[in-house]
Amino acid sequence: MAGKVVTITSGKGGVGKTTTTANLSAALAIAGKKVVAIDADIGLRNLDVVMGLENRIVYDLVDVVEGTCRLKQALIRDKRVEGLYLIPAAQTRDKTAVSPEDMIALCDELRQEFDFILIDSPAGIEQGFKNAMSPADRVLIVTTPEISAVRDADRIIGLLEAAGKGPGDLIINRLRADMVQRGDMLDISDVVDVLAIKLIGVIPDDESIIISTNKGVPVIFENNSRASTAFKNISRRLNGEDVPFLNLQPEASFFQKLARFWNGG
Amino acid sequence: MGFFDKIFGSGNKSGNVAKERLQVVLVHDRIKLPPHVMDQLRAELAAVISKYVDVDPGGIDISLSKQARQSRLVADVPLTGAKSEAH
Ligand SMILES: Nc1ncnc2c1ncn2[C@@H]1O[C@H](COP(=O)(O)OP(=O)(O)OP(=O)(O)O)[C@@H](O)[C@H]1O
Ligand SMILES: [Mg+2]
């Protein structure tokens, strides 16, 4: 088996990388794949709490890399679904404890065993990002539809291209259809236009994500919210399926319909 | 832009403002050439070209354009009189 390494990154922090990694990992496992999620945000461990596995950590990524434990010992199995595992980040070390070469060697070993290896990258353009990017077969860039996040995404795409890993696929997170419709938010087409890379998914701003994070149960396990459908669709696209994009438009008002008719469509 | 958009002025909604600002910012982020280096480039370009044709150095316009992820340096060089008519 030759597993695929998918790195989830962004330029700006807080745009939804960890949320995306947790949900895509779970969605792929639900679809029958064997998946391991790696938290590469050393010193700012977070994927464990978003996945709800924080109480089961014994060993972490740095322990594996330094040989303190065997790889198998650091794999935390998620009991909610067959085939889902986590390698948590170290909390008391910093990014220099792991090198890009360590990550490549680790992922080469994991490829033998897993269909998908998802890496949650830290924000920014420094060592942590390089660690997360170097083993990647595919990179997903997360941005929100905001000017600063899109600008930083452009910078990351440039760095990925320079490293021969680019341009990557784009995920637009926290889209608010109501604001787009009023003209007060960058639209999907604006962001895709400006960044000029392929879109792999759009996730609406959805309070069910905050609620599910509070509980440590990724939204994909819980309900049929739009966000969980959006994550499912991205996971299917990662699997090579051709899935049409969700219609995130709110129901049009009479005047908007009239305007569309007047403008020819 | 459609008739209704014109009436209700969606052309200057904050989403459009954001897109326009973003496009300008990204052009500058991507080129990484400070203004004084651009001036030098313009002067040297004028010197080279004027070996072959008469140019108006002040009229040279160097700009950056972007198609997909390919940025492109575009030089618009206005020619003056004599040499250009010599063929
Ligand atoms: N689609 C969404 N709708 C609502 N809230 C969201 C959505 N996506 C993410 N959030 C919230 O935004 C916050 C940041 O998300 P997350 O931790 O996934 O970002 P990150 O990119 O991993 O951040 P960091 O750069 O700090 O690692 C969290 O509180 C999360 O619950
Ligand atoms: Mg994170």
Image (spheres, grey):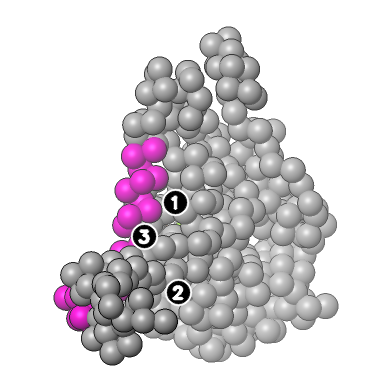
Q: Which mark is residue B26?
A: 3
Confirm or deny contact between disc 2 and disc 1 (CB under 8 A).
Answer: no
Is B43 left or right of A97, judged from the image as shown? left
Q: Considering the numbered disc 2 on the image, is that residue within a helix, a strand or a loop?
A: helix
Residue extent of the magenta highlight? B16-44
Q: Position of residue B70 (x, y in %)?
A: 50, 68
For the residue pair A148 and B63, the one nearer the viewer reads as B63
Give the alpha-carbon distance from disc 3 to disc 1, as whole Å. Answer: 19 Å
Q: Nearer the viewer, mark 3 or mark 1?
A: 3
Q: Position of residue A143 (x, y in %)?
A: 47, 52
Q: Give the residue at mark 2.
A: A159
Confirm or deny contact between disc 3 and disc 1 (CB under 8 A).
Answer: no
Q: Considering the numbered disc 1 on the image, is that residue within a helix, a strand or a loop?
A: loop
Q: Give the residue at mark 1.
A: A15
Q: Is residue B26 magenta?
A: yes
Q: Are marks 3 and 1 on the same chain?
A: no
Q: Chain of mark 1?
A: A
